[in-house]
Structures are given as structure tokens and as C-alpha cells.
Amino acid sequence: MTFSWNHALLDQLAFAWDVQFLPRMADLTDAEYLWEPVPGGWSVRPDGAGSWKPDWAKPEPDPPPFTTIAWRLAHIATFFGERASNHFGDGSFDPATVAWTGSADDALRIVRAEYARWRDGVRGLGEDGLFRPCGPAEGPYADEPFLMLVLHINREFLHHAAEVALLRDLYRETAAKASRSVR
């Protein structure tokens, strides 16, 4: 059997998505999605004009603020969406125009769609495409092989998906229990 980087990278991503992430997102409530366990954190909020927008700042504050499940899901959708658009689409993905929402179900639909575009694009690269340069969309990493970008996006997803799972655990053990005890 010949080793395939494309298969290995997609298998890693699919396992994290199908076995670790999606099952942990089952029954995510809007209350969990928007829960702010600490003041001053970043989330996805109504903008006063009928839309919802994630909190962002460039440059990011040091230290970065605490982020909610809503913010982290928007971040996951954004890094999948931007990279899929820049490398496999027309480059038009703009997080400012995404229909962010206060609904956990809607947010997960956005994440699913952007994940699928990224995954399908990586699959379409085949083996040889992983060893071509990333190109100008990756700025100072333009000359790096695409394989390095796929590894980076996999790491980003694993990292942020684990954070979301941890926040769900924390919500269940604190906010949800406190809510049940008040009833």
C-alpha cells in the first residue's frame, strides 16, 4: 500500500469532525451558544441594525479576551471559509457579510457548509496538489507547500473544537445546574 498524505490529512480531519466534534455539538442550545461565563469576553452579538456580528479587533488584544462558543464557532467557520474561498473558490468569502446568528442551529449550519467546502477542496488537490506552493493568499507563507496549510487548518480545528467541547462541559456543570436548582 502506498502512503497518501491527502488521505492521511483528510482522515485526521474527518475523525475529528465526525467522531469528536459533531457528536459533542448534538443538542447545542442557544443558551449554551451565547453563554458568557466571564464579563468582557467576545461573542456574536446583535449589531443594532438587525444583524449579528462576532466581536473582533485588529490587532488582537494581548492577552486575548475569553471567547464564547458562539465566537469560537464563528472563528471555525471563518478559517474554513476564508481558506476554501481563497484556494478553491473565487476569493470572495468575507466574514463581515456572513449571516451570523444568535441561533446555535444556524451557526452549526454555517460551520458545516464551510467545513465541507474546505474538505472537498483539499480532497480535490490530490497528492500532487499538496506539494505545490500555497500562493499569495497566504502572505509570508506563499512559498510553503499546501500540505503545511492543511496541517495548520487541521490543528486550528482540533484546537478550537476542543475548546467548544470544554465550554459545553463547563456550561453543563455550572450554568445548567444553577438554572435547574432555581426552578
Image (cartoon, helix red, strand yellow):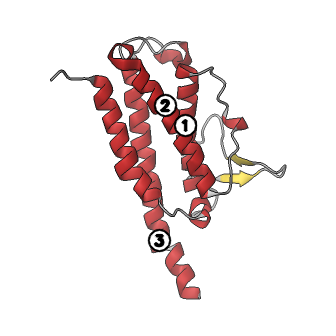
Give me the C-alpha separation between circle 3 and circle 1.
28 Å
Which circle, 2 or 3, is nearer the viewer? 2
Residue 44, given in percent of the width and then of the height, sits at 66, 51
How far across and down, in percent of the image, does residue 88 sit?
Answer: 53, 21
- Give the quarter of the figure containing the C terminus: bottom right
Q: In this view, does 10 lie to the left or right of 47?
A: left
- Which residue extends farthest left? 1
Q: In this view, does 158 lie to the left or right of 59?
A: left
Quadrant (top left/top right/bottom left/bottom right) for the N terminus: top left
Residue 139 shows in the view? yes
Q: Can residue 42 be seen in this view?
A: no
Mark 2: secondary structure: helix
Residue 85 placement: quadrant: top right
The furthest residue to the right: 49
- Mark 1, residue position: 114
The residue depicted at 46 percent of the width and 15 percent of the height is 134
Residue type at mark 3: give it: Arg
Q: Residue at x 36, y 19 (%)?
A: 126
Above/below status of 13 relative to 120? below
Quote the CA–CA distance across marks 2 and 3: 31 Å
Residue type pointed to by label 1: Glu
Residue contact at pointers 1 and 2, CB within 8 angstroms: yes
Of tags 3 and 1, the one toward the viewer is: 1
Q: Earlier in the sequence, mark 3 or mark 1?
A: 1
Callout 1 secondary element: helix
Numbered mark located on residue 118 in the image: 2
What residue does disc 3 label?
Answer: 172
Residue type pointed to by label 2: Trp
